[in-house]
Image (cartoon, rainbow, N blue to C red):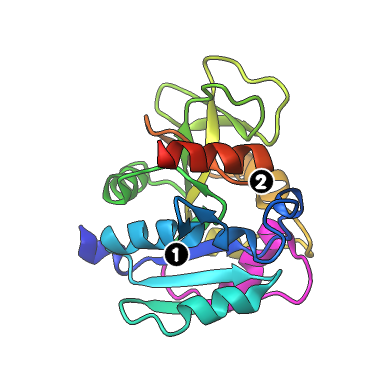
Amino acid sequence: MSTTLSSIDVLILCGGLGSRLSSVIPDRPKGLAPVGGKPFLDILVDDLLQQGFQRVIFCVGHLKQQIIERYQSHKYAEFLFSQEDMQLGTGGAILNALPLIRSHLVLIINGDSICPVNFAEFHEFHLDKLASVSLVLATPEDRHDGGVVYLNDANQIESFTEKSKSIASECFINAGIYLIKRDVIELQALVPPFSLEYDVLPELVRTKPCFGFVVKSRLVDIGTPERYLRANTKNNS
């Protein structure tokens, strides 16, 4: 299965300003914030390569040269950089990267969160469901924000609401990991800046076969000082 994964391009969204985290990590992009003594993006990339992916595209913006310099000479995979000169939003960042994507399917992941997943199983699930879009979903646990997703009995997504203030026990939260058909991305005729979570996914859920792949893994993100501190505390415990 790793041979199959090697043919799928990975897009890492890591171009945001990281405004909320800048009070504790002011001198680097959020993706290079150290967790357990290791840049967070290294944790993501190492897992991707170990599971068989070989081509990674970083969507870079704020302090982008630090990310480019860190990965441009990597010997064990192909790394490319979709550079943003202005804030495009998560959706705009994907559109900006389209000329670099050459695979029919693309794996898109947030560069400031991690939720361990078996990508071969996730890919097989996507194919079995004949999905246009598949999302990795986690249980809410103690979270009170995030993209809220409801599934039917076939794991098809019935609704998607980003940053809902009410998370019920029977729903799941978006882990920020997506398998998306490239031609579905190209159907989005929006002008940046725009959001994948607010402007694209809710419409795709209404019009395309979208499915949720539920995992038991914990979703960890470093988007706020509190969550960044918690990630480091758990990593060192």
Whole-percent x, y for residue 104 in the image: 42, 66
Q: Which residue is denoted by mark 1 in the rendering?
A: 10
Instruction: Residue at 62%, 35% (x, y): give it.
Output: 147
The residue that mark 2 highlights is 197
Front-most of 208 and 213?
213
Q: Is residue 220 visible?
A: no
Quarter holding residue 154: top left
Which numbered disc, 1 or 2, marks the residue that appears first in the sequence?
Answer: 1
The residue sitting at 48% across, 26% down in the picture is 139
Question: Horizontally, is 186 left or right of 57 in the view?
Answer: right
x%, y% of residue 38? Answer: 45, 58
Which residue type does callout 2 highlight?
Answer: Glu
Q: Magenta stretch containing residue 164, yes or no?
A: no
Which amino acid type corresponds to the residue marked 1 in the rendered image? Val
Name which quarter of the figure residue 198 lies in. top right
Q: Secondary structure at mark 1?
A: strand
Span highlighted in magenta in the image: 81-105
Question: Where, quadrant-wise, is the N terminus in this rendering?
Answer: bottom left
State whether residue 32 is above or below residue 205.
Answer: below
Between 38 and 202, the residue placed more toward the observer is: 38
